[in-house]
Amino acid sequence: MMTTAFATSPEVAPLNGLAHFDRPTYLMCPPEFYDVNYVINPWMAGNLHRPSRDAAFAQWRNLHRALKRIADVRLLPALPAAPDMVFVAHTALVSHGVAALSSFAHPQRQVEEGPMRRWFRESGFLVWETPRETAFEGEGDAMFDQEGNHLWIAHGVRTCKQSHRHVADAWHTPVTSLNLVDPRFFHLDTCFAPLADGYLLYFPGAFDRASLAKIEAAYPAERRITVSEAEATHFACSVINVGRNILMGSETPDLAARLADFGFDATTIDLSEFHRGGGSAKSLALRLSDPALSVR
């Protein structure tokens, strides 16, 4: 069994009793127990027990190393009963020391909720609970705009629309609901990524017409970067954005070049082992710091 031996990041500085960070900070969970043990999204179908643990660990280490160059990274211990815990961004949505904890739609991932609740509380966060009957899947389906003043939350596959206002109330922030219509894009992070300087990376085919109208009203055409279906199905929108730096999978090199035309410095990393489980860069790192810190 492979184990981790990474240095921990600086301790959280408390502010008014809540966790506070002075620079971009993310949480990652090593893939010590990662595998495809069940099928709860289309990408898992045909990939039962196919991921290579060694290859996944190597890919995760490369992402961890790249993220450490542009942000602080804290580590969450992996759990044997939670093979998907490596996709830690699905476990919560965080801002201003408040963690809106996920209420997972599938029992296979509900085992992650208790350990995450304890970790957030022990780390100085205020935990905002979501009722079990209203599924909510963290940063998988919810994202702040670049300044942290507005929430985009998806529904249609995993997260319930009824949870949107409840989650937004954790920060008293406006929220826009987006309807996902393609089961391949079961989470918002597979098809939608607000970027620094008011840019948006997205796949229009994942949304219904009403949702596209909302997106187009919020982002002018010159700030919308669309990806093709072929790119989207290689998780092109599952990116980590810190300032002008973008970390992304290596399967869409043309997109990396296009992002450079918009002034972004894209680093591509092979994350193909995690695609088997339905995730990529974005889902492997949960933002802990305030959204605005990641766009400066």
Image (cartoon, grey):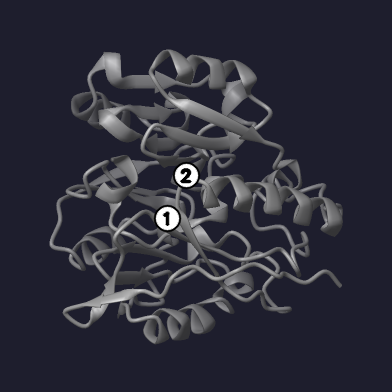
Q: Residue at x 29, y 20 (%)?
A: 223
Q: Which residue is drawn at 57% across and 73% down?
A: 76
* Disc 2: which residue: 189
Spot occupied by residue 123 in the image (x, y as percentages of width and height): 39, 81
The reply to whether callout 1 and callout 2 are in contact (CB within 8 Å) is yes
Task: Report whether 183 appears left or right of 127.
Answer: right
Spot occupied by residue 169 in the image (x, y as percentages of width and height): 18, 65
Task: Report whether 82 appears left or right of 52.
Answer: left
**For the residue labelled by badge 2, is the local secondary structure a helix, a strand or a loop?**
helix
Q: In the image, which disc is placed on residue 139?
A: 1
Distance (Cα) linking label 1 and label 2: 7 Å
Neighbour tally class for label 1: few under 14, some 14-19, many 20 plus, Cα within 10 Å: many
* Residue 223 in view: yes
Tell me the amino acid under the disc marked 2.
Asp
Spot occupied by residue 191 in the image (x, y as percentages of width and height): 47, 35
Q: Which residue is drawn at 25% across and 30% down?
A: 198
Toward the viewer: 258 or 160?
Answer: 258
Quadrant of image for the N terminus: bottom right
